[in-house]
Amino acid sequence: MVNQSRYTLEELLVANLARELKDEEVGFIGLGTGGRTFVLAVGVPTVASRLAQMTHAPDFVPMLGPIVDPDLSHIPESYTDHELLTWPCRAQISVMDCLDYWQRGKINVGFVSGAQVDMYGNVNTVSIGDYNNPKVRLVGPIAQTNHMAFGDRVFIFQEHEKRSFVERVDFISGTGFLGGGDEREAEGLRGKGPYKVFTDLAILDFCPDTKRMRLASVHPGVTVEQVQDNTGFELIIPENVPMTTEPTEQELSLIREIDPKGLLLEAKIK
């Protein structure tokens, strides 16, 4: 698996995500998750945003919920209302304005996670089983619906397990490519749909024609067979699948400077 002696899985994901972020883009990071999901959907994007700012994209603008461009050189010890309201930032806006910004195309990049994701990048955070009589009722979509309907590029973060990577999600709370092909465009959704999926085993993207999920790289020490065995549907697998690019020493040094206490990447924030 990942070379734990030199870097962690989270540091691998941060480095690869940061390289994807572009100068002057606006990226929306939600605040409504906890535990492992917090690390993947909040911690990794937040640290990656700061890493991008410190390297190739100084004017990348993160939004943590309604907080526009917070000072990521000083991460608060907790995410209580007081800490969030007093976090130095460029601006704070209402939740309704956040949703309006998505619809007006003012936010470029989204970061989401869910209980299920399917072969076309549809995400489920509402219910497992029949919606009217579910086995499990989940947290709900929060702002995920807007992320995936209107974002230019949406990154999905997911633990790689068969129960999470399913052929069809039980409920679409975040719209991917629906049933593939041009179905998304036919529904009139302006956003370009899911861009990449980051997991503990691999990075995946989507075939331009069919919109089916495709294996883009496997993490160091992981085999293609392991990825497929932990996926509940057949992936598109290219003839040659590269290894996920490892973080450089400079990237690792900066990541550890950004999050020295593990507040974000170890979920130690209160």
Image (cartoon, rainbow, N blue to C red):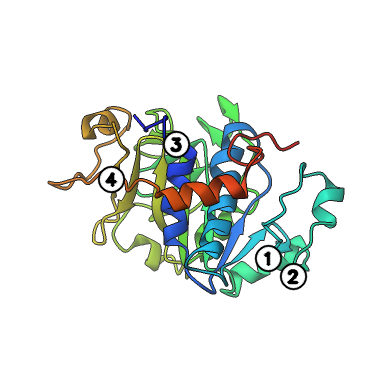
Label located before the other in sequence (4 or 3): 3
Residue 134: image location, x then y, percent: 57, 28
Any part of residue 131 in sight: no
CA–CA distance in space, label 2 to label 1: 5 Å
Which residue is tagged 3? 9
- Tell me whether the residue at label 4 lies in contact with that at label 1, contact meaning CB atoms closer than 8 angstroms: no
- Residue that mark 4 sits on: 217
**Mark 2 or mark 1, earlier in chain:** 1
For marks 1 and 3, give the CA distance.
26 Å
82 left or right, relative to 135: right
C-alpha span from label 4 to label 1: 31 Å
Is the C terminus in the top left, top right, bottom left or bottom right quadrant?
Answer: top right
- The answer to which of marks 4 and 1 sits earlier in the sequence is 1
Q: Gap in Å between the C-alphas at discs 3 and 2?
A: 31 Å
SS state under label 1 = loop
Q: Name the residue under label 1.
A: 69
Q: Judging from the image, what secondary structure is the residue with disc 2 in?
A: loop
Foreground of the two, 147 or 129: 147
* Location of residue 36 with respect to 60 vertically, above or below: above
Mark 4 or mark 2, earlier in chain: 2
* Mark identifier at residue 153: none
Disc 4 and disc 3: Cα gap in Å?
14 Å
- Residue visible at 65% across and 36% down in the picture: 34
Specify the amino acid type for callout 1: Asp
Q: What residue type is labelled 2?
A: Arg
Quarter the N terminus occupies? top left
Disc sitting over residue 90 in the figure: 2
Mark 4 → mark 2, Cα distance in angstroms? 36 Å
Quick one: SS at disc 3?
helix
